[in-house]
Structures are given as structure tokens and as C-alpha cells.
Image (cartoon, grey):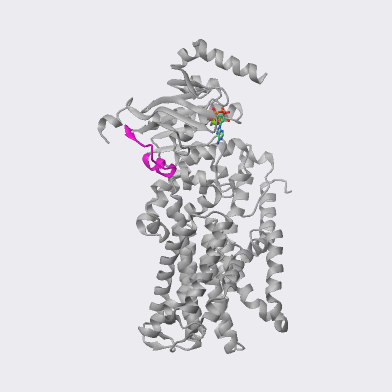
């Protein structure tokens, strides 16, 4: 949130103070609107990507991958941004989602849409189950616990025959509502999934349920005295978070119609998702968009130096944690915010520091 | 609940022989008190007497070694802190506990969590949940108006002065539509004007809305003016009880407070 330093005079109850306060408050409300507007702009841009004349196949699959990361990051933002819990193992839920949809479409020939929904629900189920384990741990131990979970999923995928380990499972072409869809069709399935999940996160955050999450994040005592059941709401947050990330996993399985342990047992997935949300802005709707695109696009901008992407990401992460703890998204909004605040406060006759 | 349990003057909240020790320190030593329905009960005592500890026991934030707690005659020894507000018991904290980087409005709205219904209909914005949300918003505005917080509704509470934060906390406690309110030093750090206002407000909440109140407060003028009955504790034990008049004249109480002043001098 933008911090506005208020002069003491602002708190006198005369009318001019009231005007000035209203100006400040109007400015703060705009901050929320900026978040939604920025999100809608990037979303619209993503919708238009396939229409652009110069977009080639690899660009489209890269954009699909960005969407997948945005969805996964939206999922983890529920946990990290709004509930104040850290998971270093969300790649595990990505894998659960991927294999759920892969196995269902392969062996039961279900529709891609059914696969995605099933992946969401199965991941959400495991999220709730694992929350009961993780939530007994505190702080760093919980982070290590989630990391252990990701390793565990990797081990299972590598060794249990049905997952076919590093050989992987080759999937048939994607079918939606009985029709085979190509790259463009798949892209729009991803876009629709993104739209649904974004709307979902928006609804949660702007509801009593979201307030309960944020209450637990900001003060456990105040939350409990307001009647928030800590275990119930944290489990719910974990479950929702896992479910959303699981839907991203399903998309990731069908993007190249191939799932293998090589891809899904990779712990860096977990790190990348977490990083996307921390860099973009954990408690912003726009944060996962920014972070997801950043994580996917960085290797491309580095071109032949792509091997150094990990180092670059590390550097960026350190810079963000040092200089922009609310994420780059918040920093991006700040100049507009400051400009508006200045104008509004001048209008209200206040001194601006 | 039976009608008898709901009638004015009947026992609302009661504790019996509560004992709490922190290692060697006995913070509460066989403390008993009763809050009758619809009354304002004061709980006073010198610094470190054990008031906050007893408060935390009553609101189930603090475990205790022995004794019992009853709410409307029902034993609640095993209730958890988050159960209390659902029964109708709401509290504030001596050291302010707020959602510091959220707005005043959000803080008050969170106080109405017990009226929100189930988390699923809330997060899917189902019609019933939206209706309850709207009602909670209206109520939050009403309470904010009552506490003169309207201009600060969209301010981040962490940036507000202390007196304001105290009021936001009270507003949050009121948002749950409590039938009993436990206030731990609500006017500490407030100026005279704010104190007078809060005093009126506690009185109004009690007399007009029928909310029972347990008030811990060092501001003697407030305690003496608003309380129907006062319990005095010292060194974790019941020292005296009675009407404000009786307590004021009680030699033990005078001695305890004079002793306290000598300690501080
Ligand atoms: N968590 C704790 N651990 C150890 N000792 C504690 C703890 N909480 C309170 N105490 C001790 O218990 C005694 C009672 O403290 P309590 O906070 O209940 O007093 P109080 O009556 O609220 O005082 P004040 O008027 O200063 O708020 C004090 O001696 C205090 O030091
Ligand atoms: Mg105290």
C-alpha cells in the first residue's frame, strides 16, 4: 500500500481538514483502481498476442508459458501475499495438476476442460490435506516442509510406474468440447483459465474470506478476537492456492502434450513461481502478471547469456527484497500515485512533504 | 438459552477461583467475578495486579491452572479465542492489536467476521453473502460515524495517532454486534476530550444497546462515573468489591493505591 505521511493538522476536525482528508482518501482508492486497470491492460494485451502479424509459433507458446506462470503466481499470491504464509514447494502442486490432467486425458479420454477442472480440484484437495501438516510447523520450518513436499512429489513421479518417470507420458492432441484444437485454440483455453482465476482471486480478496486471510497475515490476536478460525482459514488459503496453481500445472502438461519427471520434478519450478509473485507484488492483482511475464521472458532478453538467467533472477530478487518489499508493481504505481496525491493534496490545501 | 439466562441482571459472564502462574509469578490467585447482563462492571487494581491476565483468561487467550469460566451459565473452560465473538463476547487489547497496514474500513469490517456466514458463499460472492456484506458495510459506517472515524475510513490505521487507533479498535469490537464487551484500558493515552467522548460512548452502548461491559481502566473518574459495580484486585487476588461509593471509601483499596503510589514515587 502507498504510505501517505500526514501532517498533524490533518486530524483536526474542521471542515478544511476534512476536505484534505477526502482528497487523500480518494487518492488511496485510486490505488486499488490502478491495480485492476493495470491488470486489465496486460490481460487485453495477452488476448491480442495471437492477432499480431509478426507473432510466430514459438512466440505463442512462450506467451502461453507466461500465462501458465501468471496463473501459478496468482495461486501462490493467495498464500504469500494475502495470508502471510510462505511456500517454497508450489511446484509440487503444479506437478499434481499436470499429472492429474495428463492421466485423465490419456486413459479416460476426457475433455481438456474437464482435465483442467479435475486438476484444480485434486490439487486443492492435496493442498488442504498438506496444510494440516505444514500448518503445524512455523516460520522457516514450514518453508522447509513445503520444499520437502516438492521433493517428495518429484520422487513419486520419478519412481511410481504409472507416471513413467523421465521417459514421460506423451499425450494426444487437445480436445475441447469434442473438437481438436491447435496452438491458437490452446492459447485461448489458457486465456480463459487465466480470466477465471484472476476473477476468482479478485472475488476472494474483496470478500469476507479475503479479509479473514489478511487479518491472519496482519495480526493473529486481532484476527482471533474477531472470530477468525486460524486453522480453518489457513487451510482454506492453502487449498485455494494449491488449486489455482494446479490448474496452471494442467495447462503446462498440455502445452506440449508431454509430461515427464524431467520437467515436473524440477525444484526450480517452485522457486520461479515464488519469485514471480515476490518480484511482481505479492498483495497486488497485477503482481503475478508482472512477475510471471518477467520469469518467463528473462531468458529471452538475455539471449545467448540465458544460462545466466538464474544469477540474474537472484540479483533481481535481492534488489526487490532490499528496495521494493511490496514488489515492482507497487513501485510502478508510485509515480502516478505521488503525482495524484500532490495534485489532490494541493487542491485540499495541505502541505506535501 | 433459556429466557432466565437472557433477562437483565442475570449472570452473563462469570469466573470462579481462577489461578494463573507464570513460572514463579502468580498473576491470578483464586480470582472470582461476575458480570451481570446489561451492567457495566469495573475491574481495577494497581499496575501488575493481574487485570490483563484475567482478561485474557476470560477471552480464552490465556490458559489457566485452575478455576472455571461460565458464559450465560455454561462452562466455557475449553473454548478457543475465536469462539468467543461468535457467542457474543468482543474485546479490545491494552496494547492495541489492529491490522496496521489496512484501512480503518477494512479493520471495522473484519470485526464483523462473525456475521459473514460461511467462507465459500462469501468468496464466490453468492447473493446471500453479498447481502450480508452490504449490511456489514452499512453497520461499519454507522459505527464509524458514532466514533467520529468517518474522515479516516480510507486511511491506513498504522498511520493514525494513538487515540484514533484506540477508537478503531473499539469500532472493530462493536462491529460484531456483541452482547458483552471487554475493554482493557480504552482511554489510556487519550486526551481529556477523547476520554469524555469514549466515556459517553461506553455508557450509550450499555444503556441503549443493552451490551454488558467489563471495563479495566486506570482513569478513576471514568470508572467511578460509568460503572455499576467494581471489583478491585491486588497482587492477583480479590481485594474488594462494591458500588463505586463503597469502593472509594474502602480502606483496603485506599491503602493498595497509596502503596502503589509510594512504589512509583
Ligand atoms: N506472559 C507473561 N509471562 C510472565 N509474567 C507475566 C506475563 N504476563 C503477565 N505477567 C506478570 O503477571 C502480573 C500481572 O500482569 P498483568 O498484565 O495482568 O497486570 P495488569 O493488572 O494488567 O497491569 P497494568 O495495569 O500495568 O496493565 C505481572 O506481574 C506481570 O509481570
Ligand atoms: Mg493490563
Q: Is residue A163 above or below residue A18?
A: below
Q: Residue at x 56, y 79 (%)?
A: A65
Q: Position of residue A82 (x, y in %)?
A: 53, 57
Give the camera-side residue of B154 and B13.
Answer: B13
Q: Is residue B202 above or below residue A38?
A: above
Q: Is residue A239 above or below residue A193?
A: above
Q: Is residue B78 magenta?
A: yes
Region rendered in magenta: B72-87
Q: Residue at x 41, y 66 (%)?
A: A125
Q: Position of residue A146 (x, y in %)?
A: 53, 64
Seen in the image, is A276 located left or right of residue B247?
A: right
Quadrant of the rendered image containing residue B228: top left
Give the camera-side residue of A340 and B111.
Answer: B111
Quadrant (top left/top right/bottom left/bottom right) for the N terminus of chain A: bottom right
Q: How many marks?
A: 0
Residue A251 in view: no
Q: Is residue A318 magenta?
A: no
Ligand 2 placement by image quarter: top right
Q: Position of residue A256 (x, y in %)?
A: 51, 86
Q: Residue at x 69, y 60 (%)?
A: A335
Residue A138 in view: yes
Q: Residue at x 60, y 71 (%)?
A: A272
Quadrant of the rendered image containing residue B80: top left
Q: Is residue B235 above or below residue A184?
A: above
Q: Position of residue A235 (x, y in %)?
A: 44, 58
Seen in the image, is A4 located left or right of residue B208?
A: right
Amino acid at each position: 500500500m502507498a504510505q501517505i505521511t500526514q501532517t498533524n493538522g490533518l486530524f483536526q476536525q474542521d471542515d478544511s481538514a476534512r476536505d484534505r482528508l477526502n482528497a487523500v482518501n480518494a487518492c488511496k482508492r485510486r490505488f486499488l483502481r490502478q491495480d485492476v486497470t493495470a491488470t486489465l491492460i496486460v490481460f487485453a494485451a495477452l488476448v491480442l498476442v495471437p492477432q499480431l502479424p509478426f507473432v510466430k509459433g514459438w512466440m505463442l507458446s512462450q506467451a502461453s508459458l507466461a500465462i501458465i506462470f501468471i496463473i501459478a503466481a496468482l495461486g501462490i499470491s493467495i498464500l504469500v501475499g494475502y495470508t502471510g504464509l510462505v511456500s517454497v514447494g508450489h511446484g509440487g502442486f503444479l506437478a499434481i495438476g499436470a499429472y492429474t490432467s495428463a492421466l485423465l486425458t490419456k486413459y479416460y479420454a476426457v475433455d481438456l476442460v474437464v482435465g483442467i477442472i479435475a486438476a484444480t480440484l485434486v490439487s486443492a484437495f492435496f493442498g488442504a490435506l498438506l496444510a494440516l501438516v505444514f500448518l503445524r510447523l512455523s516460520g522457516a520450518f514450514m518453508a522447509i516442509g513445503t520444499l520437502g513436499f516438492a521433493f517428495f512429489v518429484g520422487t513419486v513421479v520419478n519412481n511410481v510406474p504409472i507416471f513413467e518417470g523421465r521417459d514421460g507420458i506423451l499425450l494426444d492432441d487437445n480436445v475441447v468440447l469434442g473438437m481438436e484444437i491447435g496452438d491458437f485454440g490452446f492459447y485461448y483455453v489458457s486465456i480463459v483459465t487465466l480470466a477465471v482465476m484472476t476473477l476468482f482471486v479478485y472475488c476472494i480478496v474483496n470478500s469476507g474470506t479475503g479479509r479473514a486471510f489478511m487479518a491472519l497475515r496482519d495480526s493473529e490476536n486481532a484476527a482471533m478476537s474477531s472470530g477468525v478460525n486460524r486453522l480453518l482459514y489457513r487451510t482454506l488459503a492453502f487449498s485455494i492456492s494449491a488449486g489455482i496453481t494446479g490448474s496452471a500445472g494442467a495447462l503446462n502438461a498440455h502445452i506440449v502434450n508431454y509430461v515427464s519427471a524431467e520437467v515436473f520434478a524440477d525444484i526450480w519450478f517452485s522457486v520461479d513461481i515464488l519469485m514471480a509473485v515476490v518480484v511482481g507484488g505479492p498483495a497486488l492483482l497485477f503482481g503475478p502478471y508482472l512477475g510471471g511475464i518477467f520469469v518467463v521472458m528473462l531468458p529471452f532478453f538475455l539471449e545467448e547469456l540465458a544460462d545466466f538467467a538464474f544469477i540474474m533472477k537472484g540479483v533481481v530478487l535481492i534488489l526487490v527484497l532490499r528496495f521494493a518489499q511490496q514488489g515492482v508493481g507497487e513501485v510502478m504505481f508510485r509515480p502516478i500515485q505521488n503525482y495524484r496525491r500532490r495534485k489532490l493534496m494541493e487542491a485540499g490545501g495541505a502541505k506535501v512533504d | 438459552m433459556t429466557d432466565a439466562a437472557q433477562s437483565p441482571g442475570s449472570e452473563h459472564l462469570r469466573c470462579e477461583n481462577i489461578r494463573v502462574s507464570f513460572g514463579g509469578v502468580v498473576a491470578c490467585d483464586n480470582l472470582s467475578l461476575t458480570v451481570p447482563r446489561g451492567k457495566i462492571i469495573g475491574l481495577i487494581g494497581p499496575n501488575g495486579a493481574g487485570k490483563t491476565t484475567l482478561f485474557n483468561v476470560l477471552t480464552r487467550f490465556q490458559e489457566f491452572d485452575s478455576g472455571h469460566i461460565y458464559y450465560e451459565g455454561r462452562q466455557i473452560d475449553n473454548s478457543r479465542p475465536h469462539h468467543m465473538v461468535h457467542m457474543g463476547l468482543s474485546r479490545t487489547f491494552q496494547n492495541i492489536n489492529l491490522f496496521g497496514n489496512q484501512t480503518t474500513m477494512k479493520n471495522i469490517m473484519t470485526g464483523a467476521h462473525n456475521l459473514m456466514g460461511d467462507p465459500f458463499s462469501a468468496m464466490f460472492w453468492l447473493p446471500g453473502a453479498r447481502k450480508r456484506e452490504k449490511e456489514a458495510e452499512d453497520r461499519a459506517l454507522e459505527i464509524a460515524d458514532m466514533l467520529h472515524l468517518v474522515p479516516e475510513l480510507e486511511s491506513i490505521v498504522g498511520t493514525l495517532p494513538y487515540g484514533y487507533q484506540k477508537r478503531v479498535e473499539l469500532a472493530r469490537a462493536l462491529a460484531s454486534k456483541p452482547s458483552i464487551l471487554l475493554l482493557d484500558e480504552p482511554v489510556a493515552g487519550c486526551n481529556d476530550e477523547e476520554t469524555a467522548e469514549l466515556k459517553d460512548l461506553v455508557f450509550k452502548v450499555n444503556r441503549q444497546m443493552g451490551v454488558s461491559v467489563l471495563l479495566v481502566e486506570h482513569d478513576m473518574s471514568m470508572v467511578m462515573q460509568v460503572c455499576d459495580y467494581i471489583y478491585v484486585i491486588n497482587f492477583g487476588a480479590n481485594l474488594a468489591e462494591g458500588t463505586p461509593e463503597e469502593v472509594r471509601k474502602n480502606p483496603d483499596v485506599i491503602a493498595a493505591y497509596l502503596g502503589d503510589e509510594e512504589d512509583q514515587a
